[in-house]
């Protein structure tokens, strides 16, 4: 099976590649940037399964939300067309919260949903919450990684609302479900990550 992973240099991408290789998947093409990869068309067209993980959370220019989170998804779908392939999109629980980031992920989801309904191909959309685990960078989108980094380096921890609800998802659990999608063991286009841990910022 030929696998393509965009956003391969990300926290989730690195963990996914390591586990795929660990499980014997060797034909894995790692792509960091859809727009800065020579031969991207051939990689996508010749693939069997695409993990579209490339995303931007806090760009300097808000236009990057549209370029990376929305347009890169459309670019991949346009390249696939009606070919028989499977696609996994990394989305977010911030969909619908009114933020520019959440809106960009919603548009990406709409592209995938339309393609899935039109072609009948397999598609999976994962609305991840707060991921944590090995290689997770601090001060980005993981409160656990940020707390651990600050404590290890003697920095202060700032908590605005200790009662704020928090859903946590461990990277190994995420990767297990991703690979279940690859192996055709999931039926829903919106599969859950199990387990998801419900807690508060104060408890963490």
Image (spheres, rainbow, N blue to C red):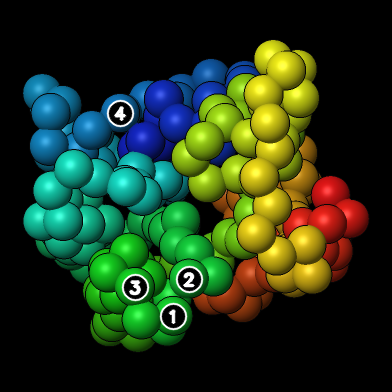
User: Decide: marks 3, 2 in contact (CB < 8 A)?
Assistant: yes
Residue 167 percent across, percent down from the top left: 73, 64
Q: Mark 1 or 4 closer to N-term?
A: 4
Q: Does the rendering let one see residue 10?
A: yes
Q: Is residue 43 left or right of residue 71?
A: right
Q: Quadrant of residue 116?
A: bottom left
Q: 202 or 185: which is nearer to us?
A: 202
User: Decide: marks 3, 4 in contact (CB < 8 A)?
Assistant: no
The residues tagged by marks 3 and 4 sit, at their Cα atoms, a distance apart of 25 Å
Q: From the viewer's perspective, is residue 26 above or below residue 43? A: above
The residues tagged by marks 1 and 3 sit, at their Cα atoms, a distance apart of 6 Å
* Residue closest to the far right: 203
Residue 148 is marked as none
Judge depth for marks 1 and 4 and give the one in front. Answer: 1
**Disc 1 crowd, CA 10 A, few/some/many (<14, 14-19, 20+):** few
Q: Which residue is mark 2?
A: 94
The residues tagged by marks 2 and 1 sit, at their Cα atoms, a distance apart of 5 Å
User: Decide: marks 2, 1 in contact (CB < 8 A)?
Assistant: yes
The residue shown at (68%, 31%) is: 156
SS of the residue under disc 2: loop
Q: Mark 4 or 2 closer to N-term?
A: 4
Q: 166 or 190: which is nearer to us?
A: 166
Residue 97 is marked as 1
The residues tagged by marks 4 and 2 sit, at their Cα atoms, a distance apart of 23 Å
Residue 180 percent across, percent down from the top left: 69, 52
The residue shown at (83%, 57%) is: 202
**Disc 2 crowd, CA 10 A, few/some/many (<14, 14-19, 20+):** some
Q: From the viewer's perspective, is residue 187 above or below residue 76? A: below
SS of the residue under disc 3: loop
User: Decide: marks 1, 3 in contact (CB < 8 A)?
Assistant: yes
Q: Which residue is mark 4?
A: 32
The residues tagged by marks 3 and 2 sit, at their Cα atoms, a distance apart of 8 Å
């Amino acid at each position: 099976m030929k696998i393509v992973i965009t956003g391969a240099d990300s926290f989730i991408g690195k963990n996914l590649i390591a586990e795929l290789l660990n499980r014997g998947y060797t034909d894995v093409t790692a792509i960091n940037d859809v727009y800065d990869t020579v031969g991207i068309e051939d990689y996508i067209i010749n693939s069997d399964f695409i993990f579209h993980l490339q995303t931007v959370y806090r760009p300097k220019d808000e236009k990057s939300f549209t370029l990376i989170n929305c347009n890169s998804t459309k670019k991949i779908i346009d390249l696939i067309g009606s070919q028989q392939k499977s696609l996994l999109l990394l989305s977010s629980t911030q969909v619908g919260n009114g933020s520019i980031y959440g809106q960009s992920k919603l548009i990406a989801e709409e592209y995938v949903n339309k393609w899935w309904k039109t072609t009948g191909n397999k598609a999976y959309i994962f609305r991840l919450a707060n991921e944590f685990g090995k290689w997770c960078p601090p001060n980005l989108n993981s409160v656990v990684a940020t707390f651990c980094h600050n404590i290890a380096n003697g920095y202060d921890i700032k908590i605005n609302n200790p009662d704020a609800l928090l859903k946590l998802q461990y990277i190994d659990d995420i990767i297990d479900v991703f690979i279940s999608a690859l192996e055709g063991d999931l039926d829903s286009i919106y599969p859950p990550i199990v387990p998801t841990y419900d807690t508060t910022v104060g408890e963490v």
